Amino acid sequence: MRVYAANGEDGTITMWYRPNSIRKIAVYENGTEFDTVWMYTDENGIIWTPVEDYVEATVKGEIAREYFSGWVLLSELRLVYDHISFIEEHEKELKPYDGTIDLDYLDKYVYWQYPGSKKANETWIEFNMPYNAEDVNIKYEYVDENNNSWVYAEVYFGKAGKGWIFLNDPTNPNSAELK
């Protein structure tokens, strides 16, 4: 999954019922972000991606969401810089990590989207959950321009947590700004 942001020429993009449809579902301001999973190329070579959104309403005192989906033109979106973008940009600077991390702190570490990012990834690591070394895969290390060390880790095949850990201060939720 990658995140794209609306980036239409006129400041908006349109969600369509299906590719090449004349039925509009919604219009979004530039900057609106969408999770994308796959792309479709139509018979004219135009690339589309399905997206999902929702509207909220209060029903009997509780918030209810009604989800809907449609298609947007990939050409009207811009990729939001992410982990994959970082890997592509810094591939030659990544090296195997020969150290270890403390498994007792897996639930306290901050798993950043990429080194220097201001966004942390959501994790599902529970306090005192029994993990062993085989459950943690540290794929590589990156040393930034300030000689700070970051490691990319996946916990339980990335299902419990994944992201970049700032080894200089791994539990600080503001460490990406401290460099």
Image (tube, rainbow, N blue to C red):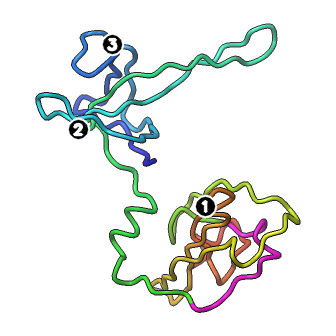
Q: Quadrant of residue 158?
A: bottom right
Q: How far apart are labels 3 and 1 at the CA level?
A: 37 Å
**Lower position in the chain sequence, tag 1 or tag 2:** 2
Q: Kindly identify which residue carries mark 1.
A: 158
Residue type at the position of mark 2: Ser
Question: What SS does tag 2 mark?
Answer: helix
Vertical comparison of 125 with 164: above or below: above
Residue type at the position of mark 1: Gly
Q: Which residues are magenta?
A: 98-110
Residue 126: where, in percent of width, then height?
82, 58
- Is the C terminus in the top left, top right, bottom left or bottom right quadrant? bottom right
Q: Please state which of the two labelled residues, at mark 1 or mark 2, is closer to the viewer.
A: 1
Q: Quadrant of residue 31?
A: top left
Which residue is located at x 25 percent, y 14 percent? 21
User: Which of 43/144 is in front?
Assistant: 43
Q: How far apart are labels 3 and 2 at the CA level?
A: 17 Å
- Residue 59 appears left or right of 176: right
Which residue is located at x 67 percent, y 73 percent? 136
CB atoms at circles 3 and 1 under 8 Å apart?
no
Residue type at the position of mark 3: Lys
Question: Can you name the residue that lies furthest to the front here?
Answer: 134
Pointer 1 local density, CA inside 10 Å: few below 14, some 14–19, many at least 20: some
**Lower position in the chain sequence, tag 3 or tag 1:** 3
Residue 69: where, in percent of width, then height?
45, 22
**Lower position in the chain sequence, tag 3 or tag 2:** 3
Which residue is located at x 26 percent, y 22 percent? 19
Q: Which is the main secondary structure of the residues drawn in magenta?
A: loop
Vertical comparison of 8 with 15: above or below: below
The circle on residue 75 is 2
Q: Kindly identify which residue carries mark 3.
A: 24
Vertical comparison of 154 with 62: above or below: below
* In the image, residue 82 lies in the stretch drawn in magenta: no
